[in-house]
Image (cartoon, rainbow, N blue to C red):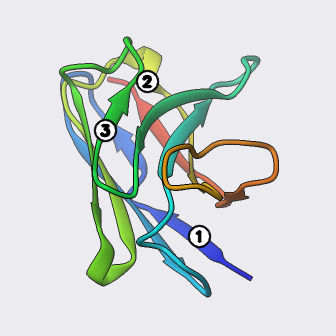
Amino acid sequence: QVQLVESGGGLVQPGGSLRLSCAASGSIFSGRAMGWYRQAPGKQRESVAAITSGGRPNYADSVKGRFIITRDNAKNTMYLQMNSLKSEDTAVYYCTRGRSPYYAGGANDDWGQGTQVTVSS
C-alpha cells in the first residue's frame, strides 16, 4: 500500500514563496506519473501540475511561470516550488501518484492527505 505524505504548507504573504514536498513510500515511485492538485473552499479539486515518470512537466494555465514541479526518484519525493503566490492560490494541496507513467489524478490513483497553503497579508 503506497503512502503519500505532503509537507511544506503554511501561511505566506502575497508575492511570497513556498515549497511543497510529497514523500512516497510502500510502492513503485519512479515508473509512475505524479501530480499536485488543490481544492479551495467551495470549489472543486483542480489540477495544478503533473510530471511524467520521465520528468516531463505540465501546468495549469493559472500557475504557469510561477510554479515548478520536480521529482527526485532516488528520494521517492516530488516537489512543488510555488513563487509569486497570490491569494487565489489559497487551498489544500494534494499529491497524487498515478497508475501509469503518463497520468496522475484519477479517482483510483493514490492520494495524500493534503497540506494547507494560505496566501494572505
Report how far apart the C-alphas of labels 3 and 1 lie in the structure.
19 Å
Indicate the quadrant where residue 60 lies: top left
State the residue at coordinates (41%, 49%).
10
- Camera-near label (3 vs 1) is 3
Tell me the tag on residue 89: 2
54 sits to left or right of 105: left
Report how far apart the C-alphas of labels 3 and 2 lie in the structure.
19 Å
Asked whether 48 or 107 is in front, the reply is 107
Is disc 3 placed on a helix, strand or loop? strand
Asked whether 91 or 51 is in front, the reply is 51
Q: Position of residue 13 (x, y in %)?
A: 27, 29
- Crowd tier of the residue under label 1, counting other residues whose Cα lies within 10 Å: few below 14, some 14–19, many 20 or above: many
| Callout 3 amino acid | Pro
State the residue at coordinates (43%, 24%).
89
Q: Position of residue 57 (x, y in %)?
A: 31, 38
| Callout 1 amino acid | Leu
- Residue of label 3: 57
Q: Earlier in the sequence, mark 3 or mark 2?
A: 3
Give the quadrant of the C terminus: top left
99 sits to left or right of 62: right
State the residue at coordinates (31%, 55%).
54
- Residue of label 1: 4
Indicate the quadrant where residue 73 lies: bottom left
Q: Is residue 90 above or below residue 22?
A: above
115 sits to left or right of 59: right
Indicate the quadrant where residue 5 lies: bottom right
16 sits to left or right of 59: left
Q: Position of residue 2 (x, y in %)?
A: 67, 78
Give the quadrant of the N terminus: bottom right
